[in-house]
């Protein structure tokens, strides 16, 4: 599974979990962008991360 595919699957999980997130997108190979309800955003550094580490890094900004 590519990083792009993983981010799409993880986005579905976050949106379905009712965490006030409306999107997660891959900006480039090193950064993802979380979009929250109300259109707030947060840029997350995911450079060199494994898929498990991407989950941890993104979740730091969710809670």
Image (cartoon, rainbow, N blue to C red):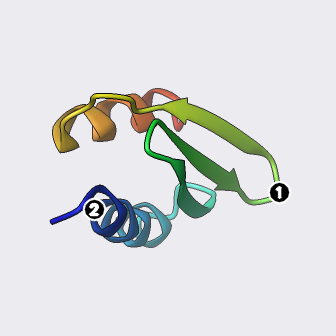
Q: Residue 33, position in %: x, y?
A: 60, 47
Image quarter of residue 36: bottom right
Which of 1/44 is in front?
Answer: 1
As drawn, is 56 to the left or to the right of 24? left
Residue at horizontal 60 percent and vertical 49 percent from the top: 34
- Name the disc covering residue 6, or none: 2
- Category of crowding for the residue at label 1, using alpha-carbon neighbours closer than 10 angstroms: few (below 14), some (14–19), many (at least 20): few
In terms of image quadrants, where is residue 44?
top right
Q: Is residue 45 above or below residue 9?
A: above
Question: Vertical placement of 60 versus 55: above or below?
Answer: above
Residue at x-position 34% and y-position 61%: 10
Residue farthest to the front, as pictured: 29
* Residue drawn where x is 30% and y is 69% of the image: 5
Is 33 left or right of 26, judged from the image as shown?
Answer: right
Determine crowd level at label 2: few under 14, some 14-19, many 20+ residues with C-alpha closer than 10 A. Answer: few
Disc assigned to residue 39: 1
Task: Report how far apart the C-alphas of labels 2 and 1 lie in the structure.
Answer: 23 Å
- Secondary structure beneath disc 2? helix
Question: Residue 57's x, y, as percent?
Answer: 39, 29
Quarter of the image with the N terminus is bottom left
Which label's residue is closer to the chain start, 2 or 1?
A: 2
């Amino acid at each position: 599974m590519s990083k792009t595919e993983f981010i799409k699957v993880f986005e579905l999980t976050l949106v379905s979990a009712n965490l006030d997130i409306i999107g997660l997108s891959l900006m480039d190979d090193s950064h993802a962008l979380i979009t929250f309800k109300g259109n707030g955003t947060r840029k997350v550094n995911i450079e060199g991360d494994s898929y498990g580490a991407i989950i941890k890094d993104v979740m730091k900004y969710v809670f």
